[in-house]
Amino acid sequence: MLSPDSAAVVRATLPAVGGALDEITARFYGTMFAEQTELLDGLFNRGNQASGGQRRALAGSIAAFAQALLADPEARPDALLSRIAHKHAALGVTEDQYTIVHKYLFRAIAEVLGEAVTPQVAAAWDEVYWLMAGALIAQEARLYQEAQVDPRHPWRQWTVVERREETPDVVSFLLRPADEDPAPPARAGQYVSVRMRMPDGIHQVRQYSLSGAPGDQLRRVTVKRVASLSDAPEGEMSTQLHRTVGAGDELTLSSPFGDVVLDEADSPLLLISAGIGCTPMVGMLEHLAATGATRPVTVLHADRSPADHALLSDIHRLVSSLPAARAEFWYEQNAAAEPGAHSGLMDLKGLNLSADTGVYLCGSLPFMRTVRAQLIQSGVPAHHIRYEVFGPDLWLAHTEA
């Protein structure tokens, strides 16, 4: 609960603090990494740091949490923090690291805002921070307990049973526990962290959706190689996986986490994806097929071309095995190569959905924003639409209509 005095101060200073959050978080990360270099080894994503995505996500989450407290000072907006807690659990974040973050974050606030940070202002925002940190620590403790994971030792070795070339820039790795003990429980839609040592000796971690049946002893992750663009380097983890990992090698994985998971209802499902966003959807389809589900399922996917559509054969196999499933595809190029596919961008006009349809989205942010707007315009309630973002969550869709 945010105290009345602190709520008044936060309300008065939120415009100033919110407007400076990008500068504050940039300074925060720069100083923290300069003095705590070990945090760069296996915890923070260098690519997201370089692009600014991580600091924008942090700034957005702090502002959203503060706004939620102001709307209801007695609220504990745990749902707002669920996605962050799952990401942290997949990295092995520990309670003591929140004290380190607090030290550098509040130093950055004081440096950026200067004399505006009076003792009262500092105390009010300190209260916001520890309410947010406390909620995350509690959620992460529950997640670790449920997964039977020690956050000090969250990693396990897995053997690559098979490497499959899905498309020219997408590869799948079929994995089993190297110690031959049972695989940890997983739910359809979840992801695992993969930890690798880079050529410079620094460990990096990325999350990849489980693209196989979550109940199997074997697990599959499907990785798209991130190409170099004019304003961004190639993805170092995806490149390393594509170049160096094959059958017989070992990978270091976390237990599965992620809060965008397939519900167990019998209501209709709509799975919408673009590009490599198909991976959690295929994991959901694998689960539905493995459990003999009879619920209506519609799969919609957009891609550059049929040749670029990863796991296309798996989708055909799974849709044909489900008694009430169908699929439609949209391709920007060479759509005629896939029978029945549409040419161009995905268009949801004429899509008839029942009021209880559950929708899952995964793809680029522009794609998901467009599709979500079309769904809401067609009458789908916003709370029926769940989305998965690969990387820092810069959307904060829960704040939208």
Image (tube, rainbow, N blue to C red):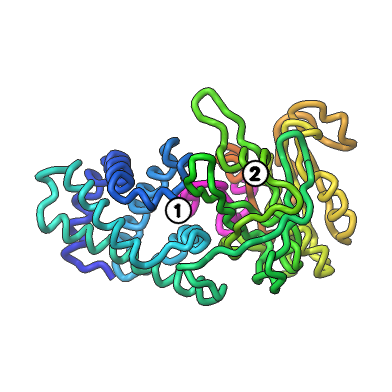
- Residue 18 visible in the current orientation: no
Q: Position of residue 287 (x, y in %)?
A: 76, 64
According to the image, label 1 marks what residue?
43
Q: Position of residue 347 (x, y in %)?
A: 71, 37
According to the image, label 2 marks what residue?
241
Return the residue nearer the eye: 362 or 344.
362
Q: Residues under labels 1 and 2: Cα distance?
A: 18 Å
At x 33%, y 62%, the residue is 98
Query: What's under tag 2, amino acid-wise?
Result: Leu
Please rate how many residues cluster around mark 1, counting C-alpha atoms within 10 Å: few if below 14, some from 14 to 19, many from 20. some
Return the residue nearer the eye: 84 or 185.
185
Q: Is residue 209 left or right of residue 282?
A: left
First reached walking from the N terminus: tag 1 or tag 2 = 1
Q: Is residue 231 left or right of residue 39?
A: right
Q: Quadrant of residue 22?
A: top left
State the extent of the magenta-drawn residues as a range.
Answer: 375-401
Q: Give the quadrant of the N terminus.
A: bottom left
Is disc 1 in contact with disc 2, using a CB cutoff of under 8 Å? no
Q: Position of residue 147 (x, y in %)?
A: 57, 73
Q: Is residue 170 left or right of residue 199?
A: right
Query: What's under tag 1, amino acid-wise?
Result: Leu
Return the residue nearer the eye: 369 or 364.
364
Q: Is residue 232 above or below residue 131?
A: above
Please rate how many residues cluster around mark 2, counting C-alpha atoms within 10 Å: few if below 14, some from 14 to 19, many from 20. some
Q: Is residue 281 left or right of residue 320?
A: left
At x 86%, y 49%, the residue is 316
- In what element is the residue under mark 1? loop
